[in-house]
Amino acid sequence: MTGSGRTRNAVDGVLLLNKPRGLSSQQAVSQVKRLFAARKAGHTGTLDPMADGLLPVGLGEATKFTQYVLDADKCYLATLGLGVTTSSGDAEGEIIAQHPVAVSVAAVAGVLRRFTGEQVQTPPMYSAVKINGKPLYAYARAGIQVERKSRVVSINELQLIDFIDKKLILRVACSKGTYIRVLAEDIGAALGCGAHLTALTRESAGSFRLAEASSLAELEAMDMTGRMARLLPPETFASSLPRHDLDAGTQQQLGCGQTIAATGVAPGLYRLYGVAGEFVGVGEVADSMLRPRRLVALSTGLPDSPINLSNPAVTG
């Protein structure tokens, strides 16, 4: 029983959530976990409280495969306020500078072209990146500056949607790990007037689209049958991987953590399926050998192997 007296269920599946503004990603996941009375839930990439939009949530066994969405490209609709820079790079920070805005559409278009392709970014102090086990935002709130490692990200597309009243609305298609706040600040600096992020909506993550997502309000209004109907299968997070079918013998061997021969199978990660067509987990082929990477517990009857990877965004 839970603290509220409710029984937690063994719910396994993927929910595409339209996270509202004002909630952290973890708070949103907790709401989903409550609505499904689920034992375990985790998300696939943090959205700041000021941001809304697509947040794929894994329940139960699906939490084992969130990494494949964390690694996927994302698309955002971002609104930049020109002429103002803030301590956090977004509307939640304190204003640290203001400048007049005398920018043409042609100048904006020219700057956007410069920011398409590979970029080097330094994670902002107000971020969830951990250094010495502590998130950067904790250091920032304490007034402590910490040295951060830069990273290479890719801006695949940077489209100007609107430019009116000192506001730029952009569609940003980018690689994992891209900080849109940092991009906003860099664009503002290149325009010579400064900028900060005033709104952000995640429109897609990998093959998942915001149009397919459910809001918390919609889920609240449903009974459990309706909510369960919104769940996608646990293997959905690994849908980008090619399929590999196992015979009964290899399925049993993998379930015991063994490495088996995979002659003629190309190297890489695979979605694995058993003799009855059931999803077994994810395996990796290297040197003509197939190794289990992440297995569904019900397919093996065994606890997770030490080779399995964990997701720090999961709550159990």
Image (tube, rainbow, N blue to C red):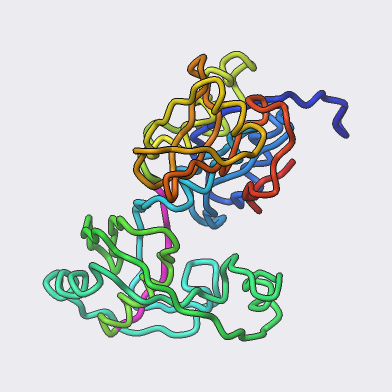
Viewed as shown, does residue 116 lie left or right of 227? left
The range drawn in magenta is 193-203
The relative height of residue 29 versus residue 9 in the rendered view (above or below) is: below
Our reading of the magenta stretch's main secondary structure is: strand
Which part of the image, by quadrant, shows the C terminus?
Answer: top right
Q: Nearer the viewer, residue 89 or 263?
A: 263
Q: Residue at x 36, y 77 (%)?
A: 120
Farthest residue, direction left: 106
Q: Quadrant of residue 58?
A: top right
From the top left corner, tell me how far across and down residue 234 is, in percent.
54, 30
Q: Residue at x 51, y 80 (%)?
A: 149
The relative height of residue 105 versus residue 55 in the rendered view (above or below) is: below
Q: Nearer the viewer, residue 137 or 148?
A: 148
Residue 68 visible within the image: yes
Residue 208 visible within the image: no
Say if the magenta span includes residue 195: yes
Say if the magenta span includes residue 294: no
From the top left corner, tell me how far across and down residue 34 is, in percent.
71, 32
The relative height of residue 244 versus residue 68 in the rendered view (above or below) is: above
Q: Residue at x 37, y 52 (%)?
A: 74
From the top left corner, tell me how far across and down residue 259 is, in percent.
57, 41
Q: Residue at x 45, y 33 (%)?
A: 213
Viewed as shown, does residue 114 lie left or right of 290? left
Q: Nearer the viewer, residue 37 or 10?
A: 10
From the top left corner, tell me how far across and down residue 22 is, in percent.
58, 51
Q: Nearer the viewer, residue 41 or 93?
A: 41
Which part of the image, by quadrant, shows the N terminus?
Answer: top right
